[in-house]
Image (spheres, rainbow, N blue to C red):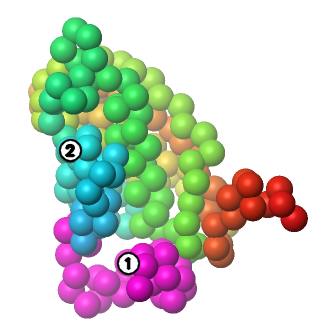
């Protein structure tokens, strides 16, 4: 059974995660497996899911040439992806629907990411019935706040409709 089918059967993401917790499943390990499937961007960036709590998530990642830009710092796109992942997973932990989509993500780049390893933290600020707002931050090994984000996620209640499928009706 696919992840999507399991979530739908459980009645939504939040219910799915609660059921796994009750069974004693280590959610960080299980989600790490799902997110890091061979060829995934999560795996390619070297992200590790450290904490998956209710409304709070923490990822870690280390500097590598794969994620670097000129000047020996982490590329801004990787920083944005880490913030979208951390804050998005925080939203996912409370999402009673079956999926979600980032509809807005604003990032302030405060310091270059030079001192590895890095932590990307996400925290839900508000869960509504149709949207959620979360914040994220990336901190380096010295404890310096390097980037701060604020985003909004659309909460999908049942079956994800792609734009092309809705245009064909």
**Camera-side residue: 162 or 151?**
162
Q: Quadrant of residue 115?
A: top left
Q: Residue at x 16, y 30 (%)?
A: 63
Residue 133, position as x, y percentages in the image: 56, 50
Closer to us: 151 or 158:
158
Nearer the N terminus, badge 1 or badge 2? 1
**Pointer 1: residues within 10 angstroms few (<14), some, or many (20+)?**
many
Which-is-in-front pick, marks 1 and 2?
2
- Number of the label disc, if any, that sits on residue 46: 2
The image quarter in which residue 23 lies: bottom left
Q: Which residues are magenta?
A: 1-29
Residue 134 in view: yes
SS of the residue under disc 2: loop
* Mark 1–mark 2 distance (CA, rounded to whole Å): 24 Å
From the viewer's perspective, is residue 101 above or below residue 98?
above
Dividing the picture into quadrants, the one containing residue 161 is bottom right
Q: Residue placed at 28% from the left, 60% from the top?
A: 37
Report the front residue among 106 and 79: 79
Q: Which residue is mark 1?
A: 17
Is 41 on the left or on the right of 43, as rendered?
right
**How many numbered dots are placed on residues in this image?**
2
Q: Please tell me which residue is depicted at 29% across the width and 82% down the height of the picture.
A: 21
Q: Is residue 67 magenta?
A: no
24 inside magenta stretch: yes
Q: Position of residue 41 (x, y in %)?
A: 34, 46
| Label of residue 64 in the image | none
Element on which disc 1 rests: helix
Identified at 56% across, 73% down, the residue is: 98
Quarter occupied by the C terminus:
bottom right
């Amino acid at each position: 059974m696919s992840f999507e089918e399991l979530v739908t059967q459980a009645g939504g993401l939040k219910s799915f995660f609660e059921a796994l917790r009750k069974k004693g499943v280590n959610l960080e390990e299980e989600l790490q497996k799902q997110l890091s499937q061979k060829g995934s961007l999560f795996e390619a960036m070297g992200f590790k899911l450290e904490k998956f709590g209710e409304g709070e998530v923490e990822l870690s990642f280390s500097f590598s040439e794969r994620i670097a830009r000129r000047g020996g710092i982490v590329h801004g796109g990787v920083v944005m992806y880490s913030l979208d992942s951390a804050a998005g997973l925080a939203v996912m932990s409370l999402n009673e629907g079956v999926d979600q989509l980032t509809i807005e993500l604003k990032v302030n780049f405060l310091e270059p990411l030079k001192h590895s390893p890095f932590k990307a933290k996400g925290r839900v600020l508000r869960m509504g019935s149709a949207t959620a707002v979360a914040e994220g931050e990336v901190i380096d090994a010295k404890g310096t706040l390097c980037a701060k984000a604020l985003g909004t996620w659309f909460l999908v209640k049942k079956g994800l409709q792609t734009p092309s499928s809705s245009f064909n009706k």
